[in-house]
Image (cartoon, helix red, strand yellow):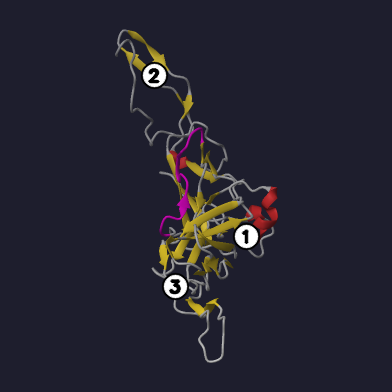
Amino acid sequence: AVAGRVSFTDIGVSSSAPSGQTWRLTVTRSSLPPAVSANFTFTSSAETQMVLAPSFVPATNSCYAFAGTGAAACAAYRPQGVSALGSVVFGGVPFSQQPVLNFELKGRGLQLPEFGGINVSCALVDATSGDLVPGDPMIGTTTTEASGGRTHFTDIGVSLAGSNYKLRFDTPGATSVFGPTFSVTPGPPDTVSALVSPEAAPKSGAEFARQPSALVLDAGGNNVSVSVQVSARLQSGGVLGGNTAVRTVDGTAAFTDLSVDAPGSGYVVVFQVTDACCGVVREAETAPFDIVVGDPHALEETVAPAGAAGGAAFATQPAVRVLDAGGTS
């Protein structure tokens, strides 16, 4: 005893003790009357089971908080054969309804409110084989502690687009529990990055020999499957020529005829994607590059001849300048 108090640290009930009976703890010391605890019920882990609450349906809201303002635009991401966005799982977005598991007596359906203090983990598996999906396909906190006879996940989701998935829930001493089968669909744009930058020194007015391209991903790092528009502009200076707005194919926006009109140094092409579903605006930049004077492309008269007389030189001699494709002499 310390300061009139005794604290036990690691006592418990043996796993061989009869389950379902009412128990009390008695603490004794010679010459003192015994201290008796309140009644409690011991339940063997062998007689407990985890049960996934039926309210859990794998689904996500696009943009984390689906709003009516983007309903029409968000519908573009709905897979064929799916009637509502509420039944779609988007990559990289937490489930809108998070899983809850209850601990119950086997065969009785009675929840065990005293059950707790153990960890429950969640993993993504192939629905047919039961094998773990390789890599790191889950997002959020995938291990949580049971308390009061239940455990509640709060922010889990799946990043990797694919089909025939199930969630598997595990805890020591209990049989694994599986959720329903579901698929994960690439969602609305979340990031854009520069895949290809122009060559180091393109010529002014001429199409880049190496045309730039951009990659658009959803929140899970999947290529967006719906075609979205990506626009291109110069960060500063010059005029960007060509078709400066293209649509993605399997997440890639490939430009084909961009050019810059004037020589200069440190040019940067900026890609921008705007998603009407979520109101997301994302930008990315190419590596900087210089523009040099291009090859001769045209002649421009700068001085017209004047003062002509038969057999004599013009009083005012004509002059021309040589221009490249961008109009630079």
- At mark 1, the secondary structure is helix
In the rendered view, does 286 fall on the left or right side of 275?
left
Q: State yes or no: residue 2 in magenta.
A: no
Q: Is residue 288 visible?
A: yes
Residue named by callout 2: 26
- Marks 3,1: beta carbons within 8 A: no
Question: What is the magenta range?
Answer: 134-149
- In terms of depth relative to the viewer, which is nearer, 205 or 107? 205
Q: Badge 3: few (under 14), some or many (20 or more) residues near its Cα, within 10 Å?
A: many
Give the x, y percent position of residue 192. Answer: 50, 58
- Quadrant of the image for the N terminus? top left
N-term-proximal mark, 3 vs 1: 1
SS assignment for the magenta stretch, majority:
loop
Cα distance in 3D space between marks 3 and 2: 91 Å
Q: How many marks?
A: 3
* Amino acid carrying mark 3 in the image: Lys
**Residue 221 seen in this snapshot:** no
Give SS at disc 3: loop
Q: Position of residue 101 (x, y in %)?
A: 53, 42
Q: Which is more foreground, mark 1 or mark 2? A: 1
The residue carrying mark 1 is 77
> What residue did someone put label 3 on?
203
Q: From the viewer's perspective, is the residue at label 3 or at label 1 nearer?
A: 3
Q: Position of residue 9 (x, y in %)?
A: 33, 25
Viewer-side residue, 104 vs 188: 188
